């Protein structure tokens, strides 16, 4: 079988590969020792690649060195000579492998992610040389995540980009390895390449990195992947903003950030403001540190310890090819203007109509802070600005009580975004509350209408409403709903007029819990006023009728 036929098989089984340019193909059916499954009887974590398949990695074909006798080899060398190569994994493929479980990998707008995977070449005594792909201690986290989706007898497919030292990487479940007459098993443990000499331009591909503790490694960059190029030569992403998400508790503000912006721990830092949170916690502070001097004596010195703002500023500055996200939960539960201090001035961002495109999103004005500047730029005299690839995202409840007020000057520096409390778009609005004839959407919608009516004179009435995710699906269970939701209604939302919702026989919260738990029939009907329960039942009928009409 030649390269053309092999590529045709790959294209039938993995349609994403059909129209791409490659010059090398290897297919590896995984044994138990090649997987990261729990309960394995081996300590091996790499994927062994041997024979002609090693030619897929021309970086390691050092026959002059490996041609010597085994006794003359430095077997320890493989622990220090670690090469990392750029592999591209793809969102559609990863989603197919993960199924309903999902994975926490952030892909770009094209549905791809360039990750670093490690390769070394080694030889066990009396055995042939092999390439060991993937050292989980130094591989990119996302590649390890990808590998955990593959199990025994699944297939790993590596496709070398034409005339480049970068690769596409796909996983195929054992049950999916055939499409009609096309089967990956025909390609297993073979190497296919274009029948021509392949030219690779090595210029600017190699860079030396300190990967793990004292281990030095050689890294190969994909010249077409901006995230792997040196900082000075990479274009910085632009357009980052300060965005403040507000809405009722449980409306999905944090969920909006996770699903539409970022959930990857490498690119985000999350903090929660509270009354005791201070500038020093947020930006950083000078703390004492005890170290040994040359005489092995304890010596006290003071060192600047960066806070989450400074850490994220440094990450965004050093990696212009990714967006970074500083997430502040409960912004107005701390004294935000005081916590930000002089950083407040950095929140003014350069806008599209006033500044060049490559500067949009950067701080309009700079500040001086020698400790932060030294940590971020390596120069204590450098002016500090938030880079154009660093977002600041914050959440705030609409009219939260007992919190600090955000003044107009502070608020105008944020893009305000209301997260609507949309039960019609909720994943579990139609789930039934266990032991009752009412679903979550109908219950919460009626309660929210009553909250506004009953507490019309209270400034904080909006925040007493139930958010879409106030009660998660598992909290609709019979042994949880009363303690989670009904207790909140009794203690907070309707504490000024509990008889508006609860049955007149319920004189205390203990009465509510006891009646709910011991009810022989519908549990909600046992504790709610009949007119309230009737409204919920009518709401369900209206929703059902609307669904049928749609």
Image (spheres, rainbow, N blue to C red):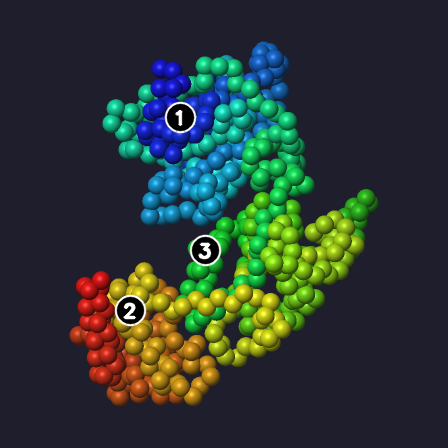
**CA separation, marks 3 and 2?**
25 Å
Mark 3, residue position: 260
Mark 3 neighbour density, 10 Å: few (under 14) some (14–19) many (20 or more): few
Q: Secondary structure at mark 2?
A: helix
Q: Return the residue found at the far front.
A: 353
**CA separation, marks 1 and 2?**
49 Å
Circle nearer the N terminus (3, 2) = 3
Please tell me which residue is depicted at 57% across the width and 22% down the height of the picture.
200
Please indicate whether residue 501 sits to the left or right of residue 32 in the image. Answer: left
Q: Secondary structure at mark 1?
A: strand
Circle nearer the N terminus (1, 2) = 1
Please tell me which residue is depicted at 35% across the width and 24% down the height of the picture.
8
- In the rendered image, residue 504, in percent from the top left (x then y), is placed at 26, 88
Image height of 494 relative to 320, above or below: below
- In the rendered image, residue 64, in percent from the top left (x then y), is placed at 61, 13
Mark 1, residue position: 28
Please indicate whether residue 527 sits to the left or right of residue 159 in the image. Answer: left
- In the rendered image, residue 290, in percent from the top left (x then y), is placed at 74, 54
Circle nearer the N terminus (3, 1) = 1
**Foreground: 489 or 199?**
199
Mark 2, residue position: 440
The mark closer to the camera, 3 or 2, is 3
- In the rendered image, residue 53, in percent from the top left (x then y), is placed at 45, 20
Residue 118 seen in this snapshot: no
> The C terminus lies in which quarter of the figure?
bottom left
């Amino acid at each position: 079988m030649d390269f053309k036929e092999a590529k045709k098989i790959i294209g039938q089984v993995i349609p994403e590969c059909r129209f791409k340019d490659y010059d090398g193909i290897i297919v590896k059916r995984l044994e138990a020792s090649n997987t990261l499954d729990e309960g394995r009887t081996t300590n091996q974590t790499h994927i062994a690649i041997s024979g002609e398949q090693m030619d897929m990695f021309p970086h390691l074909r050092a026959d002059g060195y490996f041609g010597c006798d085994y006794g003359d080899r430095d077997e320890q060398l493989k622990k220090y000579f670690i090469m990392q190569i750029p592999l591209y994994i793809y969102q559609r493929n990863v989603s197919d492998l993960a199924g309903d479980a999902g994975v926490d990998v952030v892909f770009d707008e094209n549905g791809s992610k360039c990750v670093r995977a490690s390769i070394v070449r080694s030889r066990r005594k009396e055995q042939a040389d092999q390439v060991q792909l993937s050292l989980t201690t130094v591989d990119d986290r996302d590649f390890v995540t990808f590998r955990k989706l593959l199990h025994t007898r699944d297939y790993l497919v590596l496709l070398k980009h034409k005339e480049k030292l970068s690769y596409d990487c796909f996983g195929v479940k054992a049950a999916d390895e055939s499409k009609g007459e096309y089967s990956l098993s025909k390609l297993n443990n073979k190497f296919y390449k274009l029948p021509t000499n392949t030219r690779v331009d090595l210029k600017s591909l190699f860079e030396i990195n300190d990967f793990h503790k004292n281990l030095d490694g050689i890294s190969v960059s994909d010249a077409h992947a901006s995230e792997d190029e040196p900082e000075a030569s990479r274009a910085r992403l632009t357009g980052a903003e300060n965005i403040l998400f507000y809405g009722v508790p449980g409306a999905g503000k944090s969920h909006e950030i996770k699903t539409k912006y970022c959930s990857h721990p490498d690119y985000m830092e999350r903090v929660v403001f509270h009354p005791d949170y201070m500038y020093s916690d947020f930006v950083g502070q000078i703390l004492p540190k005890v170290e040994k001097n040359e005489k092995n004596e304890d010596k006290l010195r003071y060192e600047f310890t960066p806070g989450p703002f400074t850490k994220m500023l440094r990450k965004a500055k050093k990696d212009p090819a990714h967006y970074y996200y500083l997430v502040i939960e409960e912004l107005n539960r701390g004294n935000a203007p005081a916590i930000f201090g002089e950083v407040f001035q950095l929140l003014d961002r350069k806008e599209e109509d006033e500044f060049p495109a490559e500067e949009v999103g950067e701080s309009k004005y700079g500040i001086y802070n020698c400790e932060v500047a030294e940590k971020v730029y390596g120069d204590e005299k450098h002016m500090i600005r938030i880079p154009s690839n660093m977002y600041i995202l914050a959440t705030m409840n609409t009219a939260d009580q007992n919190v600090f007020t955000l003044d107009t000057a502070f608020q105008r520096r944020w893009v305000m975004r209301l997260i609507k409390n949309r039960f019609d778009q909720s994943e579990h609005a139609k789930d039934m509350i266990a032991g009752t004839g009412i679903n979550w959407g109908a219950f919460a919608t009626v309660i929210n209408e009553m909250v506004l009516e009953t507490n019309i004179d209270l400034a904080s009435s909006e925040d007493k409403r139930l958010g879409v995710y106030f009660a998660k699906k598992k909290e609709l269970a019979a042994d949880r709903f009363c303690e989670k939701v009904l207790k909140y209604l009794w203690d907070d939302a309707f504490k000024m007029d509990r008889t508006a919702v609860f049955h007149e026989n319920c004189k205390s919260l203990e009465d509510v819990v006891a009646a709910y738990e011991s009810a022989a029939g519908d549990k909600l009907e046992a504790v709610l006023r009949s007119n309230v329960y009737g409204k919920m039942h009518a709401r369900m009928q209206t929703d059902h009728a609307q669904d049928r009409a749609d």
